[in-house]
Amino acid sequence: MNAPVAVNVSVALADIGSAQDRARIEDFVHDRNGNVFQRPMWLSAIEAGTGQKALGLVAERGGVICGWLPLSDVHSPLFGRALVSSGFAVGGGPLYSDELALEALLASAAELAMRNSVSTIELRSSEAVEGWDLIEGQHAGFERPLEGDDEAQLLAIPRKARAEVRKGLANDVEVTVGRSEQDLEAHYQCYSESVRNLGTPVFPRSLFAAVIEAFGDDADILTVSHEGRPVSSVLSLYHDGAVMPYWGGGRWEARSLRANERMYYELMCHARRKGMDRFDFGRSKTGSGPFAFKKHWGFEPEPLTYRRWTAPGVEARNIDPTDEGYSAKIELWKKLPLPVANLIGPWIARGLG
């Protein structure tokens, strides 16, 4: 594909499998202060962990990259097919040096979708794009600076939440951080049980393993255990001075042990020691329990807006778990035995993207 959609700008499919292409794009993302989900490394990990193909469009002017649109080609027998920027991410979207590059990227993305009978393109970013639907009011992001030492970090947490953290600090639990097979297993035990309890299919274990392998020291797992049993665990990403606790959860006993509160406080301290200066608490659905939890911790919500293109005459895919049509399925999922949920869940969740 090579579409000169705008003057002096050519757009082509990236060769994500080429180390040279990946390095050029990684440099562009770094130079433009892109986010972690715009990195080719993220797309490659998603493909390795879920089977959803890593794509991407590169805009060039005179042989120099002036735009990049990371894409995951997400197939699902239940939810249809979509090009997602970026797959399994809360951010992503195009990165570009000027408006002509943006226009060229998005025109080429729509052409790519039409050629491949893809009904939907999802941009997890807020670019103002004519003809693309604006999705707003559904999600918010949460971020704030880290403090200078452990005590200051504790005191920065609002009083009521801080009292819960202190209870967690008083409990006899073990906190470990690592990237080993044992860490992955502990994380999956906690995370899979947590999402089952929320009525959500769990992602494949291979997804977490692929992200840990791809990101090296820029990803790790912090786990809180009680009497040798993992009760709360989070897989975090580190990028551009910020830590993002991305996939986290706890078992039922985590509540009485205040293990989740202990986990997030310990992660703040650990991240600062790794040289991070910001805590990115990620995205939450407006009005949800996680949304309230993050506000309770003193984080102010920043509304997020996304964009979506839909092929003419076709309905966009719907993967919103709060949609009324999913409520009965969610309640049923909560009642599944955990081994059954863990067997079926990855097959469903790998198509959500």
Image: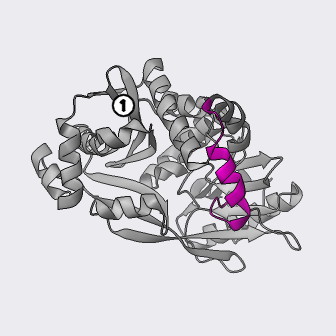
Tell me the crowding category of disc 1: few under 14, some 14 to 19, or many 20 or more residues within 10 angstroms, Cα based.
many
Q: Is residue 326 magenta?
A: yes
Q: Residue at x 72, y 35 (%)?
A: 344
User: Height in image: 4 above or below 165?
Assistant: below
Q: Residue at x 53, y 56 (%)?
A: 90
Residue 202 quadrant? top right
Near-viewer residue (60 or 349): 349
Give the left or right position of residue 33, taking residue 305 as reference.
left
Residue with the mark numbered 1? 223
Q: Residue at x 20, y 57 (%)?
A: 157
Q: Where residue 184 sits in the image (x, y, percent)?
A: 48, 26
Q: Where residue 70 sits in the image (x, y, percent)?
A: 62, 52
Query: In the rendered image, is residue 159 in sight?
Result: yes
Q: Where residue 2 sits in the image (x, y, percent)?
A: 78, 56
Near-viewer residue (223 or 65): 223
Near-viewer residue (299 or 58): 299
Residue 103 quadrant? bottom right
Q: Is residue 23 magenta?
A: no
Element type where label 1 sits in the image: strand
Q: Where residue 258 sits in the image (x, y, percent)?
A: 29, 42
Q: Residue furthest bottom?
A: 130
Magenta-drawn segment:
318-338
Colour scheme shown:
one colour
Give the left or right position of residue 25, taking residue 157 as reference.
right
Query: In the rendered image, is residue 17 in sight?
Result: no
Give the left or right position of residue 72, taking residue 113 as reference.
left
- Residue type (three-letter) at the residue carrying disc 1: Thr
Q: Residue at x 74, y 48 (%)?
A: 73
